[in-house]
Image (spheres, rainbow, N blue to C red):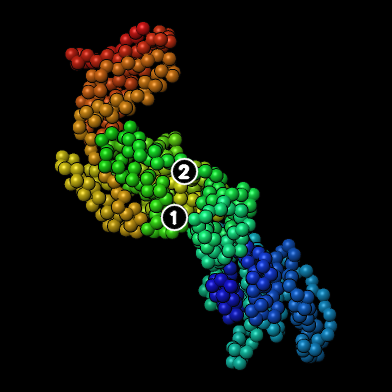
Amino acid sequence: MDFQFESLLRESRIRKGVILYGNTRDEYFDKKSKSYFLLSHYLQSVLKTNGFDVVGLWNQNVGLKFQESYEEQIFADWFNVHSEQIEEENSGESYDIDFEDHENVYELPPLKDFDELVAALTPVLQINNRPAAFILDWTDFQFGTIQTPMAPDDLESLRALSALMTGNQGSGKAANLLNRPPSTIILIAAKLSSIPPLLYQPEPRIKLFNIGLPERNSRNRFFERHLENMKLKSDPDKTRRRIIDDLADMTEGFKTMDLIQLMRLGRNEQNLSPEKLVNLYRFGQRKSPWEDLSEEKLTTVEEELKRRVVGQDNAVEHVATTIIKAAMGLSGIQHSAQMSKPKGVLFFVGPTGVGKTELAKATAEYLFGDENTCIRFDMSEYSHEESDQRLIGAPPGFVGFEEGGQLINSVLERPFSVLLFDEIEKAHPKILDKFLQILEDGRLTDGKGVTAYFSETIIIFTSNIGASKIKTDQDFRAIENEYISEVKSHFNNVLKRPELLNRIGDNIIVFNTIRERTLREEIIKRKLKPLQELIKSKYNVNLLLDTELYSYFEKRAEREHGGRGLLNAAERDFINPLSLYIFRNKNFLTEGRSIHVKYDGKSAENPISFDIIE
């Protein structure tokens, strides 16, 4: 028996009431019958074999049921003898109750109605002479929700149940404190919020008990029983014990029902490695894009990233190392053996327009073949405390609950992705608390109970912390140290979230201000390349640019605004006039022609001109 059920059994022996919530809809293994049961039936067996003579199980569909016929007869004796006692008392005669010698056979009414059950149990628990427990399942639907006022009938039901679970007459004589046979009422609900707090606050006779997910030892024993049923691919380098341990590590956060379904999936698919089987169950994909990162491809990772990001060699090198480490399966091993954490966690900091977002998109394109797998969240939109509901979903009963959260929905749709949280310092501190669970456990569950796994993602935070304070006319190492100091001060002193900073570790990557003229010209040249491709595809003409234009845009741009300043200058002086030129000369744009963009440095008013050439 698991530790949590040993504790539950101990509490059931001393309390009048126990409320179970949490993982109450899972299945549990019974060693005696070697079968899996729902919690209510499993608990009925556990209590029966551990000191309780009578254990009744109730739900509204079938009423009150017992495992053994003699239990039902004992309860029927209690129920009907009490009725007879009332009749005798009303007639002025006494009635001697002796259950051991009572030979009458009574039929038990169905007791499907909740109020009828409570009314029947109330006198029975006053006169029973055997240890008894009554499990009331699916009590989620008896009283509505906390957010809605209770109807008068529900209030009366709650009052009766409260009296039943706490007692109407006290403990009685001193001898009863130890000698009176114990009896308890156990309520099972999926969520504690479905049980009115009036019932259990404050009430020492009632114990709240959160049923947790299967612990590692439980998962380990499951795979010991069923490893051969999973039809996994044989691995001569791993012993049976090692495979079981690996599966137990990889299934952290799984319910027993998940393990059963994982076993069924393995039996149907067959010949999968444990890693591929778990990924197939979690993400619905047999093959991970991370597996396509061959040694040959990894050797060119820095080169590929630098095709899109100019002047940030230090940042590119750090990202490349993170990718290689993840591809080698070494991410997060200093924290957890199951390696369920994200593949990488990076914190980009530096002035605006220096390539932070561009490097995140380049990373997504390199890893997953499409920069759209870089999912961006503008954290300035999450500056209010309640905005965490937009990110992970509203609680049950609130508006938008059924839609889920933007972050969880995005990861469910694209489990292999780069998650970019832009300007993280603008988010409300409560939002940042959600990242603790993501970075520590690699998963997040919304109000609907849907879990998103982040183990195949790279998470990137960006920030401009310190950009307005730090002088850029100094050595990069000095700039780097100042930025890192500003970031640490912000998390420790302003946000008061040092634990989040610890999860990021040494992955604070400082982006340098791009001031070198040749690098700035190269950036604008690359930024205008997509425009040339667009003109070609839409109008079937080439866009030819004089090389002097790049130097002109570089001079016209605000240096403090980095790459965005370059784009702003190009849009103002080039793209806007080009749009008007194409609009006015659209009829002349035929296949085989080109638009020549000329630069005349002698013309101060209008140095850029356009001409259609053959």
C-alpha distance separating marks 1 and 2: 16 Å
User: Residue 418 sits in which quadrant?
Assistant: top left
Residue 593, placed above or below residue 70 = above
Q: Position of residue 331 (x, y in %)?
A: 39, 52
Q: Label 1 belongs to which residue?
A: 339
Q: Secondary structure at mark 2?
A: helix
Q: Label 2 belongs to which residue?
A: 291
Q: Secondary structure at mark 1?
A: loop
In this picture, residue 48 sits left or right of residue 310: right
Numbered disc total: 2
User: Residue 547 sits in which quadrant?
Assistant: top left
Q: Nearer the viewer, residue 373 or 290?
A: 290
Residue shown at 43% from the left, 10% from the top: 591
Q: Name the residue type under label 1.
A: Met
Residue 569, placed above or below residue 152 = above
Residue 418 seen in the figure: yes
* The furthest residue to the front: 236
Residue shown at 78% from the left, 75% from the top: 69
Q: Position of residue 107 (x, y in %)?
A: 82, 75
Q: Position of residue 242 (x, y in %)?
A: 50, 60
Q: Nearer the viewer, residue 100 or 368?
A: 368
Residue 262, placed above or below residue 519 = below
Q: Nearer the viewer, residue 390 or 399?
A: 390
Q: Position of residue 420 (x, y in %)?
A: 39, 43
Q: Earlier in the sequence, mark 1 or mark 2?
A: 2
